[in-house]
Image (tube, rainbow, N blue to C red):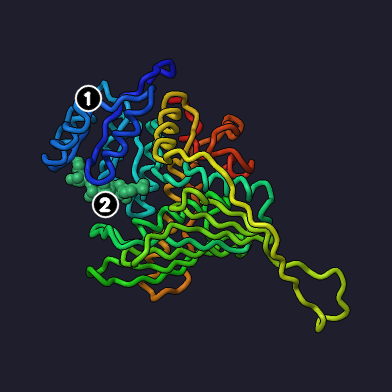
Amino acid sequence: MSSKKQELRIGVIGCGHWGPNHVRVFSQLDRTRVVACADLQQERLDDMRRRFPRVTTTTDYRDLLNDSSIDAVVVATPTRTHAAIAADAMNAGKHVLVEKPLCMTADEANHLGYLADRLGVVLMVGHVFLFNNGIRKLRGLIEEGEIGDVHYLDAVRTNLGPIRGDVNALFDLGTHDISIFNYLLDATPVSVSATGSCITQEAVEDVCFVTLRYPGNTLAHIHVSWLNPRKVRTLTVVGQRKMAHWDDIDPADTLRLYDKGLDQPPNYDSFGDFRYLLRHADVRSLAMRQIEPLLNQAAAFADWVLTGIPYGPGARDGIAVARVLDAAMRSMQQGGVECLVDGNADMLCQAASVDATSIPTSAPHLAGKAGRQNQRPPSMTRKV
Ligand SMILES: NC(=O)c1ccc[n+]([C@@H]2O[C@H](COP(=O)([O-])OP(=O)(O)OC[C@H]3O[C@@H](n4cnc5c(N)ncnc54)[C@H](O)[C@@H]3O)[C@@H](O)[C@H]2O)c1
């Protein structure tokens, strides 16, 4: 599409629990217009027409792909259908925003990344927490050295329901935490060990405990469950200088920075005398603008398509998360043994040349270490 075009026409595929939120946020932006929705269920479409009277509806998503006036589609169908629908959409020349997780396996993710690259379309993954201002602020604290070297991270994401039948709690909920860890640490894990328990359904883990080992021996832990009395969305980061705690459901006190840790005493005579001093200094609650992350994400997708400049998590990020999920499932099947995360996302880009200098440092998701920018995939540098 022409880079001069100012309005992006969007179709949303999948109008269950989450799809209508995409229609709502894209309708709020002045440079996008949602023109059509698709869902297999007529009653979902009836509901969409009531809520968004200007949007046309269809039970066959291919009607959206055959409509040349539609520039981009959002895929908000069950995860098992993502790979096929996203591939169809890209093959039809559409830019695509796929809900998380990108797909079911790393092989599928690699194929989608390859297609986006070959066809020159935007493929963005709905890792929505990378658009959460608390998580962004946390990354800023790490980049600025405020927290020091990160020793470990610990994420908890629990609630009573909603229970899914198509994927387990790790795919449903833990995907968010993997994407957050990768973003905060600017790295992907080397190995994963995971255990899970199938309580309400056969072969679908309702609760999972996952440990990821990042380069430098930084540990990250995830506890996810949809069978828990309390809704919790927290992340603790323990660094060598300071500690931080993010609580996504506490709008008044979302991010706290603790000047707590261990100091070495100035003098000690022998190893026997050696003691760390506990430091209990200030605790600061950091103020931030509360903007709906899904709206931030929609704006980034629109900007990426309209300008050709990558503004969000693309194929590489989706592949990186899919590889961790693959390794976690292998680990679960082997009773929790530590499994290596296969390959790395650079393989996708081997055949293509990447001009890292063309990647802007001002892009919100990309601002940060040069190392990470140099790892951007070609699909994120291409003009579209
Ligand atoms: N980012 C987030 O925080 C977040 C939150 C919830 C869900 N999600 C993701 O959004 C996706 C959808 O989740 P949900 O909770 O809305 O699921 P859902 O089951 O409520 O809705 C899925 C809808 O897709 C429709 N559908 C299935 N196959 C289709 C096809 N071939 N063509 C058209 N429509 C089809 C179904 O009829 C259903 O209405 C999942 O990938 C999920 O992981 C993300």
Q: Is residue 60 above or below residue 340?
A: above
Residue 281 percent coordinates (x, y): 70, 61
Answer with the quarter of the image where residue 69 lies: top left
- In the depicted structure, whether residue 254 falls above or below residue 383: below
Where is 249 relative to 196, above or below?
A: above
Looking at the image, which is closer to me, 300 or 104? 300
The C terminus is located in which quarter?
top left
Q: What residue sits 59% from the left and 40% below the top?
A: 374
Picture coordinates of residue 313, whole percent (x, y): 46, 41
Q: Earlier in the sequence, mark 1 or mark 2?
A: 1
Instruction: Indicate the amino acid at tag 2.
Output: Arg
Inspect this view and state whether residue 102 appears: no
* Residue that protrudes farthest toward the bottom in the picture: 272
Viewer-nearest residue: 247 or 57: 247
Residue count near mark 1 (Cα–Cα under 10 Å), binned few <14, some 14–19, many ≥20: few
The image's mark for residue 67 is 1
Q: Secondary structure at mark 1?
A: loop
Q: Residue 277 in the image: x percent, y percent? A: 75, 71
Q: Which residue is mark 2?
A: 80
Q: Is residue 267 left or right of residue 29?
A: right
